Amino acid sequence: MNAAESNPTPTEAESTTESATKSNFIRDIMIADIESGKHGGRIQTRFPPEPNGYLHIGHAKAICLDFGLAKEFGGKTNLRFDDTNPSKEDTEYVEAIKADVQWLGFQWDGLFYASDYFQQLYDWAVQLIKADKAYVCDLTADQTREYRGTLTEPGKDSPYRNRSVEENLDLFERMKNGEFPDGSRTLRAKIDMASSNLNFRDPVMYRILHMEHHQTGNEWCIYPMYDYAHGQSDSIEQVTHSMCTLEFDNNRPLYNWFIEQLGIFPSQQYEFDRLNLTYTIMSKRKLLKLVQDKLVNGWDDPRMPTLSGMRRRGYTPEAIRNFCASLGVSKTNGTTQLQQLEYYVREDLNKHSLRVAAVLKPLKVMLTNYPDDLVEEMDAVNNPEDASAGTRKVPFSKTLYIEQDDFREVPPPKFYRLSPGKEVRLRYGYIIKCEEVIKDADGNIVELRCTYDPETRSGGPSTRKVKATIHWVSAAHALDAEVRMYDTLFTKENPEEVEEGQDFTANLNPNSLEVLTSKVEPSLLDAVAGDRYQFERMGYFCVDPNTAPGKLVFNKTIGLKDTWAKIEQRGK
Ligand code: ATP
Ligand code: MG
């Protein structure tokens, strides 16, 4: 199953969208705010990842919006690590996130950590206690949940809700000083236990966690919750438009409540739809499970939806940005076809990749009437889409490799490539005819004996035509290469669709990686990790970092549109 074959690709009009930000409701709000002079017409955004995993293609959508919109309006964008949960976070992730944002083509104005603001957040918490808007609560986590009530039932007041300001100040300070064990107390906002919005039922602002933090070390043993930290961090940075995904819709009133109570810069939150892609999962928790359980080879496994995986696979930042620009920004979540992303990858690679010959599954061809020691240098075009890319010489000789798939002993109807007694053109070479099929003792085809027509050299005067042209490499000159072929990581469009008692890993595609021993043309000798090529007729491939001197390793980025596969499918 190859996802690329079955679904429509975007139209020409969509494909030419180059602006990072086509019209959307957040952009319209910004335009209106600039016109009305709100915040002096200033636009400040932020991208706020939690450093608890690597960035994925969903984050790319958020990054393109946060950075793209600010850039469009001459504004600024901060990269802020939302690092309020030391139990899941790590500097490895901080460094990977920075590298990925830059690779995608964006540069932040300010680089901040929510943990930079721990002292300010603490001081504001004290201010809220003094205003009788926050209290220290001794309920356990389970009790707190019980007291909160449900969507249909109001909550109950905590028995600690009416502690005096003095007692709260004293207890909160002692929480900070490390006098109490994890989970024994929290600081809660005093709002309304009967509110229809559950987030308003005295939300927890601080919890006790005796744990070293990757930025602040052992300085703190109380950590602010997301809802208390996020809006205040936005406000400190004077963020004008704080964009996040739709699931935070219900948190917006609380975001506003803290800012109002504290009387600080009025940042505002706007929610947009999450990117979901078919055959893909995006939850960092689940991606971490794939890595930890070694179901993939690390965060940058080319099958992963992470930016580092896509980079390793050969996707370009331009392609990802164009894909993000093609996505709508809306108020309802949907699922985007993986083919839409692949379309933009193919479109960009087609423009920029050098063409080379690689025989992925080699079959030896001996030209019986070709001189034994002759080596001809054939002229090959580097990129038909880009004349400035020029030409190169490729060696041609008596013994060649062609693709096993380009030969059929018994050709089906409309198969115009090589078969016994039939002719085919070798690209940049000659027309050859298959005279004899050599098999081993088990009946496997090991070699074709062919003749070539010396009058038919490409570019020469002959006008003789055959129906198909195939690629080849010269056996004596070709380099060995390991080629890693990929299919989707999951077999289901929605990997979360599972039988009872299973989890998403039940839908992992057992055939998502196939490793081939291939032959590539000698011009690839000096290829280095990250170089991208089109292997003619086979697709786009990228040099893997596992490449070492004498050991070329390629990842298949994506196929070309395979017309033969379509003809065969239709025939079925
Ligand atoms: P997870 O739940 O997998 O940990 P997250 O949303 O908590 O993901 P963050 O690191 O907090 O991940 O996300 C940083 C920013 O990226 C947030 O503003 C978030 O809304 C946005 N984002 C995350 N996933 C997506 C997605 N699939 N589509 C669009 N934006 C996303
Ligand atoms: Mg998160």
Image (tube, rainbow, N blue to C red):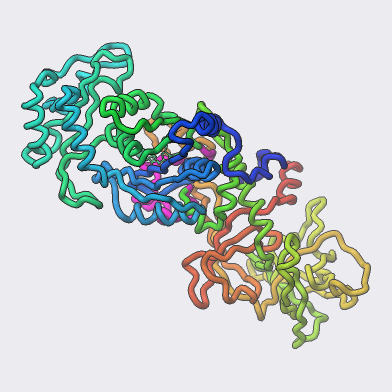
User: Residue 92, percent across and down?
Assistant: 33, 56
Q: Image quarter for residue 14?
A: top right
Q: Is residue 391 at all visible to an observer of this figure?
A: yes
Name which residue lies at 82% across and 50% down: 413
Most foreground residue, 399 or 40: 40
From the image, give the main secondary structure of the stretch colored magenta. Answer: loop
> Can you name the residue that lies furthest to the bottom here?
373
Segment tinted magenta in the rendering: 276-305
- Above or below — where is 6 with respect to 54? above
Name which residue lies at 64% across and 75% down: 523
User: Residue 567, percent across and down?
Assistant: 76, 46
- Above or below — where is 522 with respect to 46? below
Q: Is residue 447 left or right of residue 556?
A: right
Name which residue lies at 60% across and 38% down: 22
Quarter of the image where the N terminus is located:
top right
User: Residue 49, percent across and down?
Assistant: 38, 44
User: Residue 4, percent across and down?
Assistant: 63, 45
Quarter of the image where the C terminus is located:
top right
Q: Is residue 301 magenta?
A: yes
Q: Is residue 219 left or right of residue 546?
A: left
- Above or below — where is 193 with respect to 5? above
Most foreground residue, 332 or 418: 332
